[in-house]
Amino acid sequence: MDKKVVIIPTYNEKENIEAIIRKVFSLDGEYHILVIEDGSPDGTAAIVKGLQAEFPERLHMVERSGKQGLGTAYIAGFKWSLEHGYDYIFEMDADFSHNPDDLPRLYAACAEGGASVAIGSRYSNGISVVNWPIGRILMSYFASVYVRTILGVKIYDTTAGFMCYRADVLRAMDLDGIRMKGYGFQIETKYTAHKLGFKIAEVPVIFVNRQLGTSKMSSSIFGEAFWGVIKLRFRKFNKKA
């Protein structure tokens, strides 16, 4: 059976973390979870450690000292997953905005559908977002339009954070060369996979705004992504040997 791991970055997710872990472990397919925990003062790490006693072979955690950015969390998770021999590596939020029931669909797009990267896409089949303010929907949607226009990629949801990567995609990337730390990281990794010649599939999903906890979005994150996309347009990409 393929080894599959779901990377979940956390900062102050005590309201969600136990429920999301139990939900993923309830799925068929023997998914493992790697929590990248950035020093949450609310006790998120303690909850995960308690659950590790219950799921010692499937639940893993890397603790870091303070908030270091979404991108660095996923890069740390990617490196850990490759070192531990996983075949398929997923990105997913802790707050149920991504439905864990869609994990098998992302996996199938890669394992059976021939894709190297599968995106849980909010915009590939219209706009599938629930409970977001209209302003944020428009900002997110037109951010993806902007990225498609500047970079010339046929990806409708370039900022999506619900992903499945085949391990060979991440091995081919220069993970230490990924420069954007916030949500621009999502754009950069998709574009890198595209430029390296990997097949990318979009799987329509419904994104539901978090019910518990606090969003980590900020204006500085959007600023980084805006200018970072222009720089990406002129970068050269080579597969790692």
Image: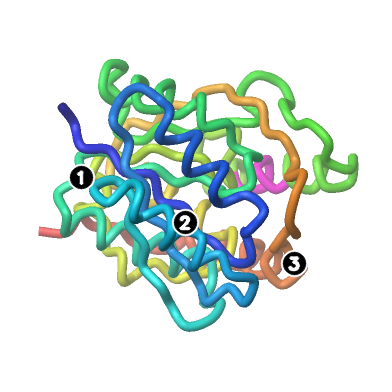
Q: Closer to the camera: disc 1 or disc 2? A: 1
Residue 193's place in the image compared with 12, above or below, is: above
User: Mark 1 highlights which residue?
Assistant: 86
Indicate which disc, 2 or 3, sits on the residue closer to the N terminus: 2
- Farthest left residue in view: 241
User: Mark 3 highlights which residue?
Assistant: 218
**Magenta-highlighted residues:** 143-147
How many numbered callouts? 3
Residue 211 location in percent, x, y?
77, 44
User: Mark 2 highlights which residue?
Assistant: 188
Q: In this view, does 1 lie to the left or right of 57?
A: left
- Label 3 residue SS: loop
Q: Which colour scheme is used?
A: rainbow
Is disc 3 in contact with disc 1, using a CB cutoff of under 8 Å? no
Local crowd at mark 2 within 10 Å, few (<14), some, or many (≥20)?
A: many
Split into 4 quadrants, where in the image is the N terminus?
top left
Question: Residue shown at 31%/57% (left/top)?
Answer: 78
Residue 13 location in percent, x, y?
62, 59
Q: Closer to the camera: disc 2 or disc 3? A: 3
- The quadrant holding residue 140 is top right
Question: Residue shown at 30%/64% (left/top)?
Answer: 175
Question: Residue shown at 51%/40% (left/top)?
Answer: 162
Question: Residue shown at 28%/31% (left/top)?
Answer: 30
- Label 2 residue SS: helix
Indicate which disc, 3 or 1, sits on the residue closer to the N terminus: 1
